[in-house]
Amino acid sequence: MNGADTAWIIVATALVLFMTLPGLALFYGGLVRARNVLSVFMQCFSIACLMSVLWLVAGYSIAFGDGNGFWGGLGKMFLSGVTADSLSGTLPEVLFFAFQMTFAIITPALIVGAYVERIGYAFLMLFSALWMLIVYAPVTHWIWGGGLLSGGEGALFAEPVKDFAGGIVVHETAGLAALVVAYFLGARRNKNVPPHNPGFVMIGASMLWVGWFGFNGGSQLAADGGAAMALTVTHISAATASLTWALWEKIKHGQASMVGMVTGTIAGLASITPASGYVSPVEALLIGAIAGVLCQEACKVVKGFMKIDDTLDVFAVHGVGGIFGIIMIAVLGHGSFAAQFGGLLVVGVYTVVVTVVLVKATALIFPIRVSAEDEVNGLDLSSHGERGYDLAS
C-alpha cells in the first residue's frame, strides 16, 4: 500500500460523490419548474443510496471480479474475501471499491436529466437498479476490469479501448440510455418553461467542475504527475468549452446566457473525461474549443431533428461529449482508431438494446409516466408530498 496514493483516492472518492450530491442535483434541479425541484433532488438522492447498496451486493463483483471476458462473476458479492488489508494495486481494495462506487452512482443519476418532471418514481428506482447491474457494471468490466475491450488475448480488439475516466463507460452509456427512456416516455406537456432557478444551475455546475478533479484526476489511481496532468487538462477543457459555448450562443442569438455558459462547462468536462490521462494541455484546449460548439448543436439535433424530448440534454452534452472525447484520443494519436470506434459501436449497440428491454420490462410492473394531472401539478406534491418553496410564508 502507498500512503500518498491512498490519501489522494480517499479525497477523490469524496469529490466524485460530491458531483452527484449535491452538484448534479442542484444543476438539474435549477433547470426544471419550481414545482418539480424536490422531485429531482429526491431522484438523485435515492439513486445514490440504491446504487451504493447494489454496488456492494453485486455491482462491484460484476465489474471487477475474476470472471470471464463478459462479466466479473459473483465471487466478490458483498465484498466477499475483501478485508482492510486486501490490496488493489497500491490501494486498499475497499477504497478502490468505494471510488468505483461513486462512478456507479453518478452514471444512472446522469440519466435523470432526460426524464425529469414526468417519470414515475417506482419505475425510476427499479429501472435504475436493473440498468446499473445489467448495463453499467458489465461495460465497466469490459474496459476497466480486464474484459472484452481491454485488449490482448481473448479481447475483441488487439489494442485496448482507451477510456481513462469514462467517455464510454459513463457518458456514452448514460447518454444513450437517456435517449431511449425519453423516447418511450414521450415529451413533456409544457416544454417551453424556462429554468426556475438559474442560480442553482450555476452552483451545481461549479460543484460538478470541482468534483470532476476527483473524477479524472482520481482515475490515475495514484498521487503522481499523471494525476496532476489529468486534473490540469480537465480544467483547461472545461474553461475553453464554457467560452466557446457562450461565444457561439452570442453569434447565433445575440446574447450569451449564464445557463448556456455553464452547460458548456459540462460539455467540456464530459469531452475531456476519456482523454484526460493521455492528452496535453494544448490538446485539451482543442477538445474544449470544439466541444462547446459541437454539444450545443447536438441539442438542436436531438430535440429538433430527432424529436426526442431529452429534457436537460443528457445525450447532447454527456453522450456526444463522451463519444467525441473517445474519438479524439485516436485523432490525436493516443489510441487505435479500430479499438476506439469499435468500442463505441459495441457498447452503443449493447446499451441501446438492453435499455429498450429494461424499459419495456419495468413498464410491465410500474407505470413509466405519472398522470396528466400529477404532471401539471408537479411531482413535488404528487409523488413526495412536499413543496420546494412555501410562497405563502
Image: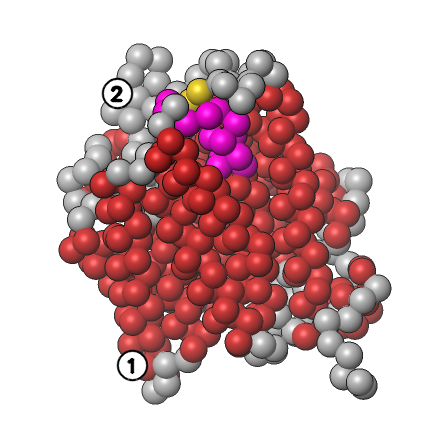
Give the alpha-carbon distance from disc 2 to disc 1, as whole Å: 45 Å
Q: How would you rate the neighbour count of disc 1 (Cα within 10 Å): few for under 14, some for 14-19, many for 20 or more?
A: few
Is mark 2 in CB contact (under 8 Å) with mark 1?
A: no
Q: How does the figure colour the protein chain or chains?
A: secondary structure
Question: Which of disc 1 and disc 2 is earlier in sequence?
Answer: 2
The disc at residue 251 is 1
The answer to whether residue 127 of the structure is visible from this angle is: no
The answer to whether residue 217 of the structure is visible from this angle is: yes
Residue at the image position 61 percent from the left and 66 percent from the top = 29
Q: Tell me the residue that label 2 is attached to.
A: 158
Residue 101, percent from left and from top: 54, 36
Q: 30 or 128, which is in the foreground?
A: 30
The quadrant in which the N terminus is found is top left
Residue 232, percent from left and from top: 26, 53
Q: Would residue 354 appear left or right of 263 to someone viewing this image?
A: right
Q: Would residue 158 appear left or right of 373 to someone viewing this image?
A: left
The image quarter containing residue 8 is top left
User: Mark 1 is on which residue type?
Assistant: Ile
Q: 144 or 23, which is in the foreground?
A: 23
Please tell me whether residue 93 belongs to the stretch shown in magenta. Answer: yes
User: Mark 2 is on which residue type?
Assistant: Ala
Residue 369, percent from left and from top: 74, 56
Magenta residues span 89-101
The image quarter containing residue 37 is bottom right
